[in-house]
Amino acid sequence: MKIVIDLGGTSIRAMRISDTKFVENIKKIRCHSNGTVDDVIAQIESLIESFSTEGISQIGIAVPSVVDVHKGIVYDVTNIPSWHEVHLKDIIQQHFGIETLVDNDANCFALGEQYYGEGKDFNNFIGITLGTGLGSGIVINKQLYRGSNADAGEIGALPYLDSDFEHYTSSLFLARRSTMAGEQLTKAAVKGDASALSIWHEFGKHLGHLLQAVLLTYDPEAIILGGGLSNAAFLYESEIKKSLVNGFPYTNTLKHIHITFTKLQNANLLGASKLR
């Protein structure tokens, strides 16, 4: 039995899980993202303590940042400004006396898909999370690939137009184009608001350009997209396809690539239970 945590700049979620599925309802609290390191640590510890730790063999934590997975050190969490270098593994492990493993949330998303979702059918795939930022996890030959410094998959930081891909394929793009948040923008588009529809279509075009970069770099069997903005996929999915068809140089690759949006709920939490 394990306890898993998904740390985000907006909220922190947790559940207790067996090897097959969660056994208690997910608990969720608002993250004190503007607080001190200790403030957020206290929230994580409180969530863990809200479960019975009897029989718990491991604590797995997904975080939205670069992680030294061997030492469990978290660096420069964009949406939690005080977290420049947090020795999260040691802190939690010493507090509870339970083995603790920490990894990037997009890596956990990819693991969740590999074991429980669309990724089960593929040896090589890329999992991409679309949310406050953009993250990706790389699975090669059924193994999570982290790179030499655990930085592999930071495709959002690749240069694009006047900035990088993350600023055009995450909530950062929506915030620049509209005063409405993603959910509000989705509702407006569904009602036929021309401005909202235009923003989502442009988002899809940029996302298509990102997928071109992924295909040219990794040539995976599949790309699986998730994260909060994937809920609006029906508004921009056609633009992704147009962008790929009109701009990708290798048409044969497009015949074989499987691009899909996740059907798996709580992939980050499920993946955190598979950390090794």
Image (spheres, grey):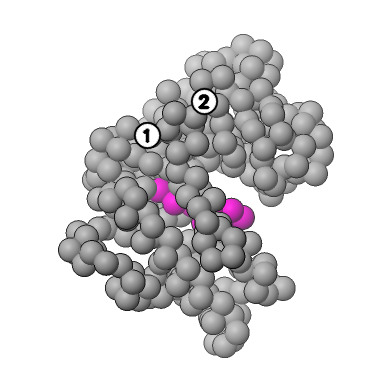
Range of magenta residues: 127-134
Q: Is residue 212 left or right of residue 196?
A: left
User: Residue 9, position in %: x, y?
Assistant: 68, 46
Q: Position of 250 compared to 176: left or right?
A: left
Q: Is 232 situated above or below 62?
A: below
Q: Is residue 226 visible?
A: yes
Q: Main secondary structure of the magenta part?
A: strand
Q: CA distance from mark 2 to mark 1?
A: 12 Å
Residue 79 placement (x, y as % from top left):
69, 47
Quadrant of the rendering where the C terminus is positioned:
top left
Query: Residue 211 versus residue 49: which sits nearer the camera?
Result: 211
Could you tell me which secondary element the residue under label 2 belongs to?
A: loop
Residue 167 on the magenta segment: no
**Type of amino acid under label 1:** Leu
Q: Residues within 10 Å of mark 1 (few under 14, many from 20)?
A: some
Amino acid type indicated by mark 2: Val
Image-quadrant location for residue 163: bottom right
Q: Is residue 122 above or below residue 133?
A: above
Residue assigned mark 2: 69
Frontmost residue, 229 versus 203:
203
Residue 144's tag is 1
At 72% across and 35% down in the image, what residue appears? 83
* Image position, residue 19 (x, y; %): 39, 28
